[in-house]
Amino acid sequence: MLVTGKEILAKAHQEGYAVGAFNISNMEILQAIIAAAEEERSPVIIQTSEGAIQYAGIDYLKTMVHLAASKASVPVALHLDHGTTYETIISCIRNGYTSVMIDGSHHPLDENIAATNEIIKIAHAVGVSVEAELGRLGGIEDNISVDEKDARLTHPDEAVEFVKATGVDYLAIAIGTAHGKYKGKPELDFERLETIKRLLNMPIVLHGASGVGEEDIKKAVSLGINKINIDTDIRVAFTEGVKAVFKNKPEEYDPRKICGPAREDMKEVIKGKMRLFGCSGKA
Ligand code: TD3
Ligand code: ZN
């Protein structure tokens, strides 16, 4: 069934686990995620970036996800990931997304608050949940100073001010993860997470979670992360699956035989994430 992001994440916050938010850009990825959620009896968040909307078309994506959600026996939310333009966000609300992210993290605090509030007023009027982001993702490189680190990562006092001024439903914070493949090992600032969770006492979101070690993910969940965004690990599973098909049979030309095995591989990766995040059995 299709539900709001707030409904899924309020329960995760109360009970102390995280729900996977997986990016889709085609049918096979969506089917892999839904099958994994069904098999794990897990709630799930399906998200599309602005790039995915440009690639597949919002009509295709929303229709596929609405169909999948209506057939699914587990809670499914449809979320806009990293919404940056007013037009895209409003278009998602009109197209039946149940959650949107307004990413004003590159703006100064006051502008981020203003942009977030503009979206919240509209989204909440029609029962759509809102995620915002504070701090800058990108990870901590070896040559970065402590001061620079502190400037990038989410400041706990600013987080309190931001949430008070906006009433956002869940907040994405920067604690040392980065989008895409990691060059070095990510160093997560768990103390910062612990402080922010204690001060805010609301659902907290972790971006750039592909490639983060299992122990670090478990610790982040135990300290209050409730939504975990995964894209790269699924892309890699898809690509490796397709490569394996061609390695065995270079002359293969049936898309079903190329994408089918990759869909199975993605499903297994996603099931593993659900067990790790603690959302298995929570549907
Ligand atoms: O918002 N996203 C997905 C889009 C980022 C493109 O990689 C994430 O936070 C997931 O990040 P990752 O590192 O899993 O791709
Ligand atoms: Zn992200």
Image (cartoon, grey):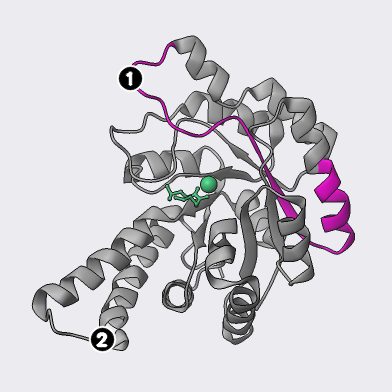
Q: Image height check: is 143 above or below 230?
A: above
Near-viewer residue (65 or 16): 65
Q: Which residue corresponds to the image point at 28% horizontal and 65% vertical from the top-left?
A: 239
Numbered badge on residue 142: 1
- Disc marking residue 257: 2
Number of other residues with Cα within 10 Å of mark 2, as a class: few under 14, some 14 to 19, many 20 or more: few
- Dot 2 lies on which element? helix
Few, some or many C-alpha atoms within 10 Å of disc 1 (few <14, some 14-19, many ≥20)?
Answer: few
x 49%, y 76%: residue: 34
- Distance CA(mark 2)–CA(mark 1): 43 Å
Q: How many marks?
A: 2
Q: Secondary structure at mark 1?
A: loop
User: Which amino acid type is marked by label 1?
Assistant: Asp
Q: From what the image shows, is residue 43 above or below residue 155? A: below
Q: Is residue 122 left or right of residue 190?
A: right
As for residue 206 lying within the magenta part, the answer is no
In this rendering, the answer to whether 121 lies above or below 77 is: above
Q: On the rendered structure, is 124 left or right of 106?
A: right
For the residues bearing labels 2 and 1, Cβ distance under 8 angstroms: no
Question: Can you say which quadrant of the picture contains the N terminus?
Answer: bottom right
x and y percentages locating residue 174 in the rendered image = 54, 33
| Relative horizontal placement of residue 243, taking residue 281 as reference (left or right) | left
Identify the image quadrant of the C terminus: bottom right
Does label 2 or label 1 sit earlier along the sequence?
Answer: 1
Residue 232 drawn at (x, y percent):
38, 54
Tag of residue 126: none
Q: The magenta stretch spans which residues?
A: 117-145
Amino acid carrying label 2: it is Lys
Percent x, y of residue 2: 67, 75
- The residue shown at (34%, 76%) is 263
